Each structure stands twice: as structure tokens, then as C-alpha cells.
């Protein structure tokens, strides 16, 4: 067996990459939420001076990359790869954001699991000595996502209580072979789990079984107990998906509830901000990680974090054709210090 | 600098993965083309017993995976990762194809460059000792692509002479730390190149500058001369894109024309089969590689191949918003024997 593998789906990194910088830019609604003090920038309106929401989403990613570079003091010539993806068809927010960077680009897609998918692959690139510096980044945009996946915003369609609110924002990290942490130490790559949920307005329920599957696999593969982590953080299951995940974990003998949270449940004050079950979209876990988690790791308020972004691998066509929603979740373990 | 990097964008693999098996399944039109004897299976009609073209495309990929496994004698429990992507929105051909595999899944998107993107990342996973066996696979389908990117087939829209024909097919490889070749030795990862072409019916011209950029970078990074390769094979530039690439290479001092071909130009007898400028789609380079190239490598008719799939990173939305077409190309060098 390849000598960095442990258990079924996990890699233990030999040369854990350091997260040299993290950055996040969000929209106005996210900027009114409880995590507002952690974001690098809050834009005033969803168009941000662009002619379309899609172009505004690309700008979010482009400007977040600039922040990653300036914070880390790394020039774009020193970045070996960008791993990026988003929710727009043909991941076009990313491709247009990166058009002028001159950096080798590898497009990834895992729906809202894209942030940890890109961090997983980025960790492999650094650990395997294929790269010194890698940017891992994603974005989403409420207006471009509603337009593409649901209804024209102008219709003012009513949303069911299980719906989640797509985050407008881009978040990313710069992984490096240099630096003094926080470090990515383990990568557990999820497999697709589909429990037959067909309601695209109830993504949390569709993704929760995938999250639980990856969590249990991570604990079994590594032999690490949940209480070794200060925070176990899923991507964007929202409040309902969180409840289901807690329940599924208990059924399998793991009570994680005292240290478990979800980016979708954290990014909005869901009642005050009328966000129903919470945030979603690639940008949700990306900005919560790039803002809150990273800064709390640097401050020492968090030391060991298990970060599991979760994706619903549906498309409007697959739903129209009566398909259920396949879910996936990828976990990365992050430690402030290597002990 | 990370110790497997040479030059600006290239990695020289330390433990070159072996391509343990390759497979391809194509549609009826491809099965009437000049490469028909190389494909593992030719389906009789574009629906292949499914209720939609999208489901038929997923079936193409699923059945190709079965062939990869049975040919290599590897069980799906021994495959550590599947790297897959396709042209459908949210890469849904892949996600529904892989739903029941139980294998860790990493979704990739590089438009028609997806085959070499997945082979590049797959090579890193094996070389870096993160995996023993990795499947790299893509698909495309003429009918699902026309429906999504262009016009309903029922309209019978006329196509301009520069248009290409999306290949119906899936092709893939199983990369392994075991085996006796052919081996992937070098990976040159492209950056986005956009020369301002806006005509979505002239993708060859949009992608050719990216292909030339990656080719020149590969030769400069590695110090390898073009005549070290028996075959330099681009993904799906088609006949017009090939001409442009030959010209761009000459302008930069590289005459590759005596050993250069293109999967899009090879897969159809373009005049007899009314395929205009040739084939395109992720499935084009994937099936030509998984069929023709791999078998000719095994027979010893080819020994050293530089394979460069090329992608046009547009979306219907970006074209509607007046954007030009960003191109990208990723190269992998393949050798029958390690000398």
C-alpha cells in the first residue's frame, strides 16, 4: 500500500504544508452576520461595479487571490498552481478570475465540497514536492447561483423553511512548503453517498449522510478520537443538516455534539437575517475558514480543527430528470503546531 | 524549489506511474471513423437504452470504468481515487456515473483538457505515494453537449465550417504504482491563455495558442527536443486548430509538423463523415488515447508520446455576456519504457 495511506480513505502527510495565508471577501448580507469582524473585506452591493453577477463573482475571487499574495509576501511567479472551482456552469467564475494570473491552473469541482477538495489536492502537491506554493480557492454568489439553479431573482419566489442561502463570497488559502503553521496533517477523501433525497431545497439532509460517512471514516482510519479536535466543522449543512449529522454520528457511536459546528449555521444569524436553514455555496465554507477559523488558529483559540466541506452533486438537469442528490464530503485535519 | 519541478510549469516524476490499463467506449458515428478498430465497444444508438442523453453519458463512463478494472485485474476496492470530469453542468455525467462505486472521488474540470488534467493529478497521487491505483476518466456526448451548449438538436441548426463535432464516448486510464509501462514521466500544467477569440463555433482557433504555449513551455522546461517524441498529440483542436498550432510553433522556432497530430482530426474521416473541422469534447482525446494511442504503445509502434489535451474554458453565460474564450492545455509525457 502506498506509504502515506492509512486506513481506507486517508492520507497522513509526511511534510505537512503550512497555511501561509488565508483570505476572504464577502457580500453585504454576510457582512451583517456574526462573523463580520473576521472577513478581509465586505462589499457594498452584489454587483461590485461589474456588469453582471457572474463578473462580480470572478472579481471576488481575483481580489481574494491578491489578498492571499500580499498577506503572505509571495509573488504570483512563486505560486506553482492554483486549484479553484465554483458553482457556475463550467466553473466559469474561476476561469475568468484566473485568466490573467499566468499561473498553472487545475480546475476542480465538488459543489460545496470544493474548498476541502482543493485543499486536499493542494496538500498533496506540496507534500509530494511537486510545488512550493499552491493557492486553493473557491467562490459563490447568491445572485448568480439563484439565477442558475433556482428562479430569476425578479420573481421573488418564496423559499421553503429547509432552504439555505447561497453565500456571496470568495475564500482561499495559500499552502506552502515553508512557514510555521497552521499545518494540514491528514486528508480524508470522501466517496459519493446518495440516500435518495430528491428535494433540492433540502440540501442539508442530502449532504449529512456523506458528512457522517467521511467523519466516521476519518476517525477509524486515523485512530484519532473526536475529542482530539477543538472544532469539527462541516461545510454548509445548515441547521437542519447539522442536527441530522449529530444524530447519524451518535448512531455510529460518536458523540461529537460538544465540539461540532457548521459553516452554514455560523455565517448568518439565521433568525434575524431570515436565512432559513443557514448559508450554503462554495463560498460559505471557504470564507468561514479563510476568515474565522484561520484567525482563531493564529490566535491560539483553536489548535486542532477537522474541516469537512460538503457537496451536493446535483445539477438542474439531474433534478428535472427525477434523480436523487448524491452527496460528498472531504476532510482535512489542521493543527496549529506539529507535536 | 520543490525537488520534482523543472523549469516553470513542469514536474519530472520520480516514481513514474504505469498505465496499467486503458479503455474506451464510443458512439455510432465514432464507430464508423478511422479509429473504429481501437475502441473497446461501439454503442448502437446515442441513448444506449437509457431515458436521457445525460444518463446515457453516465452509463458510458460507468461501463468504461468496468472495462478498466477487468482489463487490469484490479478490484474497485483497490482503487484509491477516481479523478473524473465532463462537460455537463456540475460535471453531472461523472457524479452520476460514480455514485455507486464506493471509491474516493475528486471532481475535475478543464473542459476538453480534462483528460490530461486528470492524468496529471493522478500521476502526482501515485508518484507522491498517496495512492497505488487511480482511475482518470472523462466523457462527452454529442446530444447532451449540443442541448446544453448550442441549440436543441430538433431544430436541425446549420453549423459553420469551423464547427467541431462533440464526440460521444468515454475514455480512461488506470494509473498504478505497479506495472511495466507505458509510464508517465513528465507533467506540464498549462496556464490560461486568451487571445480574444469570441466565436464559440471556432474553438480550435481559441485553444491553439494555449496548446502552443504549453508545448513550448514543455520543451523549454525539460530540454527535450520535439524529435524525441514519435507523436505529439493535441486534444481536440481539429483540422483548423492544428494548422494554427503548427504555424504558432514554427514562429517560436519549433517545427513539429512531421510528428504532430490532433485527436479531433483523427477520430473522424472529416469529409466523408461531414464532421467539419473534426471532433471535440472531453471524450475525444480520452477515447483516442484510451483506444489508439495506448494500443500502439503496447504494440511498440509508438514509444514516446507527448499528449496535450486542450480546453476552451467558456460557458454559454460568458459568451452571452460578450466574453472571449480562455484556452488551456495540459501535457503529459508518456514513454513505453523507462531508459
Image (cartoon, coloured by chain):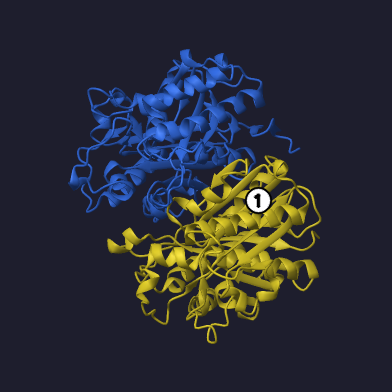
Chain colours: A blue, B yellow
Near mark 1 (Cα within 10 A), the count class, few <14, some 14-19 or many ≥20, is many
Q: Locate residue A231 relative to residue A274 in the image: left or right.
A: right
Q: Is residue A304 above or below residue B298?
A: above
Q: Is residue A284 above or below residue B293?
A: above
Q: Locate residue B5 relative to residue A248 in the image: left or right.
A: right
State the image coordinates of residue A188 (x, y, percent, origin top left).
59, 32
Q: Locate residue B112 relative to residue B321 in the image: left or right.
A: right
Q: Is residue B261 above or below residue B272?
A: above
Residue B72 visible in this rendered orientation of the protein: yes
Q: Locate residue A69 relative to residue A167 in the image: left or right.
A: right
**Quarter of the image where the C terminus of chain B is located:** bottom right
Q: SS class of the residue under badge 1?
A: strand
Q: Is residue A65 above or below residue B25?
A: above
| Tally of numbered discs | 1
Residue B256 visible in this rendered orientation of the protein: no
Place residue B161 in its image quadrant: bottom left
- The residue pinned by badge 1 equals B135
State the image coordinates of residue A123 (x, y, percent, origin top left).
57, 37
Residue drawn at (42%, 69%) of the image: B206
Residue extending furthest bottom?
B272
Residue drawn at (32%, 36%) of the image: A167
State the image coordinates of residue B302 (x, y, percent, origin top left).
74, 71
Residue drawn at (58%, 47%) of the image: B98
State the image coordinates of residue B87 (x, y, percent, origin top left).
47, 59
Q: State the residue in front, B237 or A126.
A: B237
Place residue A92 in its image quadrant: bottom left
Place residue A193 in its image quadrant: top right
**Marked residue chain, label 1:** B
**Quarter of the image where the N terminus of chain B is located:** top right
Q: State the residue in front, B209 or B201.
A: B201
Amino acid at each position: 500500500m502506498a506509504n502515506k495511506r492509512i486506513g481506507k480513505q486517508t492520507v497522513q502527510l509526511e511534510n505537512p504544508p503550512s497555511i501561509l495565508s488565508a483570505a476572504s471577501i464577502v457580500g453585504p448580507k454576510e457582512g451583517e452576520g456574526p462573523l463580520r469582524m473576521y472577513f478581509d473585506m465586505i462589499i457594498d452591493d452584489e454587483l461590485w461595479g461589474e456588469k453582471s453577477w457572474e463578473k462580480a463573482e470572478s472579481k471576488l475571487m481575483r481580489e481574494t487571490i491578491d489578498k492571499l499574495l500580499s498577506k503572505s509576501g509571495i509573488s504570483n511567479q512563486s505560486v506553482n498552481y492554483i486549484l479553484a472551482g465554483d458553482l457556475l456552469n463550467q466553473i466559469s467564475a474561476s476561469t475568468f478570475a484566473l485568466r490573467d494570473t499566468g499561473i498553472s491552473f487545475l480546475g476542480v469541482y465538488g459543489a460545496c465540497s470544493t474548498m476541502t477538495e482543493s485543499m486536499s489536492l493542494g496538500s498533496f502537491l506540496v507534500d509530494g514536492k511537486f510545488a512550493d506554493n499552491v493557492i486553493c480557492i473557491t467562490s459563490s454568489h447568491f445572485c448568480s447561483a439563484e439565477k442558475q439553479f433556482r428562479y430569476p431573482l425578479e420573481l421573488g419566489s418564496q423559499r421553503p423553511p429547509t432552504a439555505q442561502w447561497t453565500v456571496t463570497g470568495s475564500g482561499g488559502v495559500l499552502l506552502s512548503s515553508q512557514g510555521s503553521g497552521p499545518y494540514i496533517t491528514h486528508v480524508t477523501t470522501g466517496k459519493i453517498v446518495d440516500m435518495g433525497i430528491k428535494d433540492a431545497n433540502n440540501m442539508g439532509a442530502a449532504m449529512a449522510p456523506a458528512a457522517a460517512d467521511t467523519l466516521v471514516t476519518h476517525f477509524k482510519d486515523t485512530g484519532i478520537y473526536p475529542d482530539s479536535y477543538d472544532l469539527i466543522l462541516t461545510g454548509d449543512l445548515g441547521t437542519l443538516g447539522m442536527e441530522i449529522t449529530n444524530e447519524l454520528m451518535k448512531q455510529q457511536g460518536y458523540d461529537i455534539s460538544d465540539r461540532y459546528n457548521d459553516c452554514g449555521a455560523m455565517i448568518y444569524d439565521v433568525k434575524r437575517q431570515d436565512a432559513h436553514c443557514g448559508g450554503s455555496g462554495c463560498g460559505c465554507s471557504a470564507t468561514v475558514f479563510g476568515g474565522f477559523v484561520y484567525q482563531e488558529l493564529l490566535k491560539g483559540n483553536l489548535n486542532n480543527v477537522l474541516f469537512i466541506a460538503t457537496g451536493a452533486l446535483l445539477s438542474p438537469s439531474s433534478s428535472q430528470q427525477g434523480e436523487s442528490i448524491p452527496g460528498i464530503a472531504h476532510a482535512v485535519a489542521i493543527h496549529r503546531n506539529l507535536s
